[in-house]
Image: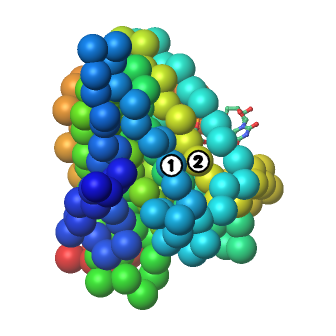
Amino acid sequence: MSRFDRISTPIAGLIVVERQRRGDDRGFFSRFFCREALADFGGDGKIAQINHTLTQAAGTIRGLHFQQAPHDEAKFVSCLSGAVFDVAVDLRPDSATYLQWHGEVLSADNGRSMMIPGGFAHGFQTLTEDCELIYLHDKPYAPEAEGGLNPLDPGLAIAWPLPVSQMSPRDQALPLLPNRIVAARR
Ligand SMILES: Cc1cn([C@H]2C[C@H](O)[C@@H](COP(=O)(O)OP(=O)(O)O[C@H]3O[C@H](C)C(=O)[C@H](O)[C@H]3O)O2)c(=O)[nH]c1=O
């Protein structure tokens, strides 16, 4: 029995991973990550950093963040409390889905993770209060390489499920895509 089910998305390389649970009358056991079963994470399944966030208000958006190459990191994003609408945007310039986004509900209940390759921007909106996320990264944090896209950019037209309740000042100030890039995509 596989410990993980893979669900493909319309964007090549962007995978939803559903963690299988073995329940009994105490609750359940599930394997959270496995380098052997998820060796395609970051190319060799190695984890460089694990981050944890708590976001208290429903409707909050964090992101859209990425790191410039060669610090472009793969992320394995999971929600252990509450529920979020998790979004990845394809920033790979040669990709057929360049600048396309895909969103998935990740929740404590559905046991789903988003496995995001390097070359994507990532963000999420909380659908409930008190959402806790765990991010596995295949490369370490490199603040000098940090970049971001404005999550409310009409050029991306991300269908956030809730009215936006909170964003950091940094995320509010993230740049919009240049018109020439948006026009070229259509
Ligand atoms: C990412 C990161 C940040 N930090 C510091 C930098 C800031 O002083 C503070 C908060 O960082 P930031 O405002 O980037 O946190 P979020 O807005 O939650 O962004 C995160 O959530 C979005 C959705 C992501 O995908 C990123 O992984 C991550 O940037 O932690 C660190 O010390 N180490 C780290 O690895």
Q: Quadrant of the N terminus?
A: bottom left
Question: Residue 15 location in percent, x, y?
Answer: 33, 62
Residue at (52% x, 55% y) in the render? 34
- Residue 117 position in % (x across, y down): 49, 66
Report the residue at 37% width, 83% height from top. 95
The residue indicated by pointer 2 is 136
Instruction: Name the mark nearer the viewer: 1 or 2.
Output: 1
- Residue 181's disc is none
Please tell me how crowded label 1 is: few (under 14), some (14-19), or many (20+) other residues with Cα within 10 Å: some
Q: Which mark is residue 33?
A: 1
How many marks do you count on the picture?
Answer: 2
Q: Is residue 13 above or below residue 113?
A: below
Number of other residues with Cα within 10 Å of mark 2, as a class: few under 14, some 14 to 19, many 20 or more: many
Q: Observer-nearest residue: 99 or 85? A: 85
Task: Identify the element where label 2 is drawn.
Answer: strand
One can see residue 115 in this view = yes
Alpha carbon of mark 1 to alpha carbon of mark 2: how far? Answer: 9 Å
Screen quadrant of the C terminus: bottom left
Kindly indicate whether the residue at mark 2 contacts the one at mark 1 (C-beta within 8 angstroms): yes
As rendered, which of 21 and 183 lies closer to the eye? 21
Is 127 on the left or on the right of 147, as rendered? left
Going 45% across and 81% down the picture, which residue do you hit?
93
Of the residues shown, which amino acid type is indicated by label 2? Leu
- Is residue 142 left or right of 73 when viewed as pictured? right
132 and 67: which is toward the camera: 132
Q: Is residue 177 shown left or right of residue 140?
A: left
- Ligand 1 is found in the corner quadrant, namely top right
